[in-house]
Image: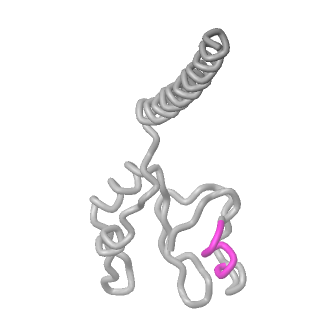
Amino acid sequence: MKPIDRFFRRYILSVIGILLLFFVINIVLIGILFLTSYLNGVKDSVFPMERFSNLIEQKNGAFAVDPEANDILAQTDAWAMLIDDEGAVIWESGLPEGLPLKYSASEIAMFSRWYLKDYPVKI
């Protein structure tokens, strides 16, 4: 019975070894993925909306923008626009070419939840 016991012991140990190797390889691959993302400078998708909106003020019918607002846009590689009640763009900063300057209420409702052309939208 000793050869049979030895066979099963080796079988069980090899299965445990293979499972441990599998988990170690997965952990290493996930670590490499996160490290690569970090080193490639993946930008944080959290845009400081409240801080940004506090830096824009309306004075005498025109919008005064603090330079820090432009810094925020530059750091996050973003652009911004303000739309009035009729759907016309009344202020913009870095607006991509090809985007319309007037929107209907249904267009605003659609892009406020998803994308405007190929650009993700935050409201």
Q: Is residue 123 left or right of residue 64?
A: right
- Magenta span: 108-114
91 inside magenta stretch: no
Residue visible at 64% across and 20% down in the picture: 8
Front residue of 42/99: it is 42
Q: Is residue 101 left or right of residue 37?
A: right
Image quarter of residue 48: bottom left
Image quarter of residue 60: bottom left
Image quarter of residue 96: bottom right
- In this view, which residue lies farthest toward the bottom? 85
The correct choice, above or below, for 76 with respect to 5 in the image is below
Front residue of 7/22: it is 7
Residue visible at 53% across and 31% down in the picture: 23
Residue visible at 51% across and 34% down in the picture: 30
**Image location of residue 85, percent across then percent down:** 56, 90
110 inside magenta stretch: yes
